[in-house]
Image (spheres, rainbow, N blue to C red):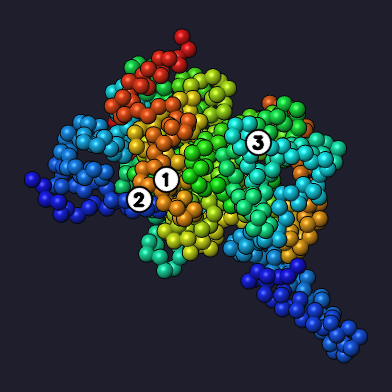
């Protein structure tokens, strides 16, 4: 896979150098052979070094990488017997949300995922992974079904945000999200959510009320896409990089703030370099949390989940000079 | 006769778009932003700040709203001193940008301007001697944006309703989540919705009143979870604002397309209520939903 991000230029050059030398095959001179070995050693080292120190904006680029694994890729690599459920039982079916039961090793889990598209056709089909109200309503009914059948819920989050169109307003996008936030908070089965790419705002949170929230190492989670945040704060989306840095969107930053339970490591150079390895890491993390959560009674599970979100917020008490009454 | 050429009084809602507000002519008249009619301030105030010609509902402060809804002297404020701590230490600024104030500086400026510590006032009161807890948002404070303090105060209000087993009223007005608080702001959607889920289990009624504008993370959480959802006429109520939809979809949306009447038509509200009818309506609801 080519190194095509701007900050990967040194890696692209090394790779080109390696390819050129390798092409010579038997005709390599001794010092060229040495150069080749050096370069082959240098490439993974440099990759590791660059990826250990990604800036906020660089992380955004990796989280949005066109070759990054999407939900369906993980489902294929982690689960068996996935049966996709469709429809919101009201008016439509949203392809940005992929949901249904599957076997995670020997256990049936209910998967509720956001799916982006690879090529133009798929992107359109999946609405770029931006769910409509129908999507959140499908997610809600599928989750309630999971509760009925005692299936833990695994939520894979990867969206730049909820869908933005007049039709979405007509069908009550706000109400759809509010409703599922409310319902998820009281579901009596364990819920593990993992942000695998972009955790875009309310669109992401809509399937993100969970007992454990994981983030892949180079994923992002933000109150708004950096471009949107920049337009709001500074009235110019060109300041997106500043917004990304200010809002602390990287997994490691979110983890430091105590807002995510675990960072799942990605292979060196990003998840797109090794789908299987990333899936293995993710599956292991999910399994571990499911085992943990299974130990809790329903009451403990629900109260812990309530407190998890109840305690989020930073405030202080100001010295006020006399109360103002009506 | 008042001359037309009066400079608009511009009020910059920090971090939000500049909106021209109430061209003031001396202090005795205001100009309706919608129909441009000149209204005598005294009559306008007596009319609950609703234009007597076109019925445009002007935005109220939280304290004005509370005064108009509850029994006189019944309101007892809670947590008046809660304030934000700038949790992300949001000091980053693009060097070329004209407004170089940090979030902390903007907060202080807004606090001085409005006399509030943040964009919501909470407490308990009575309406026609019936008790309720209420949280009323204020658009004048940073565009009513929801950060940790708004989320916390609304959640505490709901929890107080559960504890005392009395109805909850939340009056919403918001431009959305507060960007400078990042994920803390986003999570307030989860926190408030979870509290409402508990209220629901406790079978206690929650009345949600939407006023202009109610958007973004606020509409996608507590605002749209009322057992009864009311809205003032002509209020902008949406998830994504029409201007943003226009930019995204490259279409044109007519002015006032996404307002209370639109939202009612599409099944998302229970009633659109004129400001003068709000108190009687809430009285009626409190009577109907009380556990007799």
Q: Which chain's residue wears label 3?
A: A
Binning the other alpha carbons within 10 Å of mark 2 as few (below 14), some (14 to 19) or many (20 upward) gives: some
Q: Which chain's residue wears label 2?
A: B
Return the x and y of residue A161 as percentages of the image width and height: 57, 49
Q: CA distance from mark 3 to mark 1?
A: 32 Å
Image point (78%, 52%), residue name? A279
Return the x and y of residue A271 as percentages of the image width and height: 74, 59
Return the x and y of residue B217 as percentages of the image width and height: 50, 42
For residue A8, above or below residue B41 = below
The residue that disc 1 covers is: B175
For residue A111, above or below residue B279 = below
Q: CA distance from mark 1 to mark 2?
A: 10 Å
For residue B245, above or below residue B276 = below
Dot label at residue A87: 3
The residue that disc 2 covers is: B13
Q: Quadrant of residue A2?
A: bottom right
Q: Quadrant of residue A155?
A: top right
Q: Nearer the viewer, mark 1 or mark 2?
A: 1
Which quarter of the rendering shows the C terminus of chain A?
top left
Q: Which chain's residue wears label 1?
A: B
Q: Do tag 1 and tag 2 residues touch (Cβ < 8 Å)? A: yes
Image point (45%, 16%), residue name? B289
Q: Nearer the viewer, mark 2 or mark 3?
A: 3
Which quarter of the rendering shows the N terminus of chain A?
bottom right
Image point (43%, 31%), residue name? B264
Which SS class for mark 3?
Answer: loop
Which SS class for mark 1?
Answer: loop
């Amino acid at each position: 896979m080519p190194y095509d991000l701007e900050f990967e230029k040194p890696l692209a050059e090394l790779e080109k150098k390696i390819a050129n030398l390798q092409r010579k095959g038997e005709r390599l001179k001794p010092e060229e052979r040495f150069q080749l070995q050096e370069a082959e050693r240098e490439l993974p080292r440099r990759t590791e070094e660059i990826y250990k120190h990604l800036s906020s904006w660089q992380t955004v680029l990796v989280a949005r990488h066109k070759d990054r694994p999407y939900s369906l890729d993980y489902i294929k690599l982690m689960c068996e017997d996935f049966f996709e459920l469709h429809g919101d039982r009201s008016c439509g079916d949203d392809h940005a949300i992929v949901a249904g039961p599957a076997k995670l090793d020997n256990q049936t889990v209910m998967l509720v995922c956001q799916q982006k598209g690879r090529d133009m056709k798929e992107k359109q089909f999946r609405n770029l992974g931006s769910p409509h109200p129908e999507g959140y309503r499908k997610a809600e009914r599928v989750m309630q079904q999971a509760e009925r059948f005692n299936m833990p819920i695994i939520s894979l989050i990867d969206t730049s945000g909820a869908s933005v169109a007049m039709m979405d307003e007509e069908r009550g996008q706000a109400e759809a999200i509010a409703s599922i936030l409310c319902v998820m908070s009281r579901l009596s089965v364990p819920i593990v959510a993992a942000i695998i790419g972009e955790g875009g705002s309310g669109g992401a949170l809509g399937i993100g009320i969970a007992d454990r929230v994981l983030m892949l190492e180079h994923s992002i989670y933000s109150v708004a896409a950096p471009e949107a945040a920049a337009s709001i704060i500074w009235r110019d989306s060109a300041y997106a990089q500043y917004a990304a840095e200010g809002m602390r969107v990287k997994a490691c930053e979110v983890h430091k703030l105590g807002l995510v339970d675990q960072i799942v490591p990605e292979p060196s150079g990003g998840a797109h370099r090794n789908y299987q390895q990333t899936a293995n890491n993710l599956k292991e993390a999910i399994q571990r949390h499911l085992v943990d959560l299974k130990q809790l009674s329903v009451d403990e599970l629900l109260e812990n989940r309530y407190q998890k979100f109840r305690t989020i917020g930073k405030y202080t008490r100001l010295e006020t000079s006399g109360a103002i009454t009506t | 006769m008042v001359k037309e050429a009066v400079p608009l009084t511009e009020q910059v809602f920090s971090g939000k778009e500049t909106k021209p507000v109430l061209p003031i002519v001396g202090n005795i008249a205001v100009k309706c932003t919608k129909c441009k009619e000149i209204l005598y301030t005294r009559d306008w105030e007596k009319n609950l700040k609703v234009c007597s010609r076109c019925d445009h509902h002007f935005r109220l402060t939280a304290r004005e709203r509370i005064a108009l809804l509850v029994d006189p002297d019944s309101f007892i404020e809670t947590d008046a001193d809660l304030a934000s701590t700038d949790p992300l230490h949001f000091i980053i600024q693009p060097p070329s940008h004209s407004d170089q104030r940090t979030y902390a500086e903007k907060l202080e400026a807004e606090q001085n301007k409005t006399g509030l510590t943040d964009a919501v006032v909470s407490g308990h009161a009575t309406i026609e001697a019936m008790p309720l807890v209420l949280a009323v948002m204020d658009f004048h404070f940073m565009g009513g944006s929801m950060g940790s303090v708004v989320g916390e105060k609304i959640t505490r209000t709901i929890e107080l309703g559960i504890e005392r087993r009395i109805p909850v009223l939340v009056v919403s007005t918001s431009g959305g989540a507060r960007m400078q608080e990042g994920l803390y702001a986003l999570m307030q959607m989860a926190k408030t919705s979870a509290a409402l889920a508990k209220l629901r289990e406790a079978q206690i009624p929650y009345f949600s009143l939407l006023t202009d504008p109610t958007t973004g993370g606020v509409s996608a959480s507590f605002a749209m979870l009322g057992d009864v959802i009311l809205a003032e006429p002509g209020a902008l109520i949406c998830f994504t604002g029409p201007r943003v939809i226009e930019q995204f979809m490259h279409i044109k949306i007519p002015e006032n397309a996404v307002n209370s009447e639109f939202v009612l038509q599409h099944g998302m509200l229970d009633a659109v209520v004129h400001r003068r009818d709000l108190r009687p309506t809430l009285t009626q609801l409190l009577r109907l939903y009380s556990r007799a």
